[in-house]
Image (cartoon, helix red, strand yellow):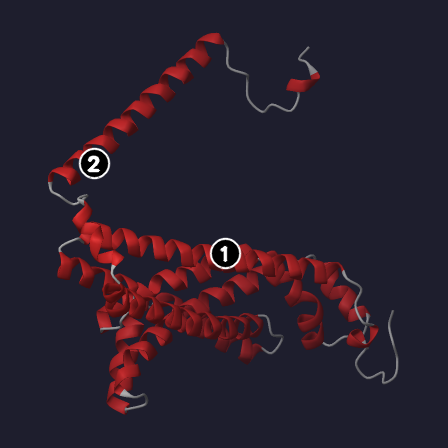
Amino acid sequence: MRPAAQATVIFDAPGPRARARHHALSAVTVLAAGALGWLVYSRLSAKGQLAAEKWEPFLTADLWRTYVLPGVAGTLTAAAWSIGLALILGVGLGVGRLSPIRPVRWSCAVIVEVFRAIPVLIMMIFAYFLYGLLSVFPPQQIALAGVVTGLTLYNGAVIAEIIRAGVRSLPAGQSEAAAALGLTWGRSMRLILLPQAVTAMLPVLVSQLVVVLKDTAIGYQITFVEMVRQGTVVGSQYSNYLPALLVIAALMITGNLALSAAAVGLERRLRRARHSPLDAATIEPEGAPGARVV
């Protein structure tokens, strides 16, 4: 009879020999990782990539003002526009795919499948040349418009599938209760189903929004000024590719962490709102003016 403390263990506890073997493997892994790290460090140091003078340009305001900050501004601008537009498009297409109206449902499904199947870079290049031919935007904004268009269409289609999966994952009793209250499909979706689905799928949505931020780097193919492009320019100008890319990587990580932190705060607010009492007026049954359901 096993002790109660081990009743929840889903595998056999290792014995003395197994523990010794695990410790030996862990030690070998640590030593191998340390040896690999030292090999990389020694090779980079031998080529002068870790010398202090390689980092000195980043201590000057001119480098940041000329190269880094314009790249940061371009990345954040493209990401902000793309995230906002992709969320709007994704919610619209996701709700459309759940619509009881068959033509709407099929049209949204076709749009989602088409834009999910086309690579982001192709959509960026197509939009870039199309906007250039039609003179829709000023010449200095065409690259930004192409990047935003490609990211919006692709990520909007992906977000639509996330929204649809989130609504479909809810218990059937939610929509049945809404129908029992006399709510139309549109009001039940807006007041009951969609808020719960967004809250449940928020971690997946955040992951997709992080992808949007990182995929702005693809815009260098259409001459868009963003962080990664500017990092390579700095590396070429000052012959310090490794420090330049490390700085750009640190900036990208900072941006992603800030986006994740904002999403966590939003998730907490949404969860508190879900547990707060609803105003009876917001769920007034359709066709029953003055009636209040509590």
Which residue is identified by label 1?
260
Q: Position of residue 103 (x, y in %)?
A: 54, 80
Q: Splitting the image into 4 quarters, where does residue 179 fall? A: bottom right
Distance from disc 1 to disc 2, alpha carbons, whole Å, reads 32 Å
Amino acid on which the number 1 mark rests in the picture:
Ser
Choose between 53 and 68: the one closer to the eye: 53
Choose between 87 and 187: the one closer to the eye: 87
Choose between 155 and 57: the one closer to the eye: 57
Task: Indicate the quadrant containing the N terminus: top left, top right, bottom left or bottom right.
Answer: top right
Tell me the residue at 32%/77% (across/down): 144
Choose between 273 and 103: the one closer to the eye: 273
Q: Splitting the image into 4 quarters, where does residue 98 fall? A: bottom right
Label placed on residue 272 = none
Q: Secondary structure at mark 1?
A: helix
Q: Position of residue 132 (x, y in %)?
A: 25, 86
Amino acid on which the number 2 mark rests in the picture:
Tyr
Which residue is identified by label 2?
41
